[in-house]
Image (cartoon, grey):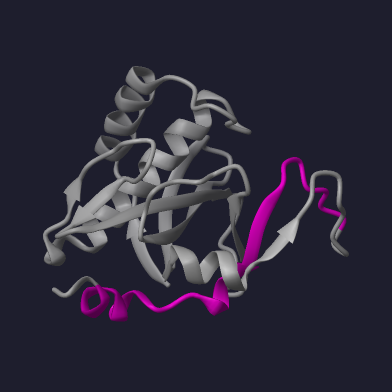
Amino acid sequence: MQVVPITRGDCEEAWAEAKRIGVLKNSLMGKSGSFVGLVGELAVFRSIAHLSPLRDNTFEHDLLIGSRRIDVKTKRWARRPPPEAPVNVPEYSRQDCDAYIFAHLVWRAGEGSPAEVLVAGWIERDRFINNSTLWRRGEAKDCGWVCSKDCREMPGSSLEPMESFGGWCGC
């Protein structure tokens, strides 16, 4: 996983954009969900800057690299998750993208602000859908977590490493 430190400037930019966007439809976290997602997008954008991405934040995708449309999925964590930590996409999410990049936003303990983003890896959208597990709302995992919305999930260890992303993009 690539570690991307979060700056005060990242937080300010994400809050300003989150206020402009408002609450995303079906968001589990309300306006703070927009903030978490935008911090993740900014961190991923910086981590792949050498590939010359464009931020093209639509409801379909977040980044463009050439003709490739990438959606960044960010999950908030209280502490650093292990590499196999699950990544998921809501089942209702039928975004028109070519690939997902998954990121983990690690919150600064006791300070109420994000500390870093761990860029977990990437996967082509169709491969994710075909190889993920469908969890239905109300289903409980062995760890006690109960699914609040239908979603698709896979272990983070199943993702492609970010080092291979540029080749897939043709960069």
- 160 or 6, which is in the foreground? 160
Q: Residue at x 26, y 50 (%)?
A: 63
The x and y percentages for residue 145 are: 81, 52
The x and y percentages for residue 130 are: 58, 70
Q: Is residue 100 above or below residue 32?
A: below
Query: If the image is split into quadrants, where does the C terminus sit?
Result: bottom left
The x and y percentages for residue 45 are: 25, 53
So how many labels did they put on this image?
0
Indicate left or right for 156 with 100 as reference.
right
Indicate left or right for 47 with 73 as reference.
left
- 109 or 133, which is in the foreground? 133
Query: If the image is split into quadrants, where does the N terminus sit?
Result: bottom left
Q: Residue at x 58, y 40 (%)?
A: 110
| 99 falls in the magenta region | no
Q: Residue at x 21, y 53 (%)?
A: 64
The x and y percentages for residue 31 are: 50, 24
| 146 falls in the magenta region | yes
Indicate left or right for 45 with 31 as reference.
left
User: Which region is colored magenta?
Assistant: 144-168
Q: Residue at x 31, y 45 (%)?
A: 62
Q: Is residue 122 above or below residue 41?
A: below
Q: Is residue 133 above or below residue 92?
A: below
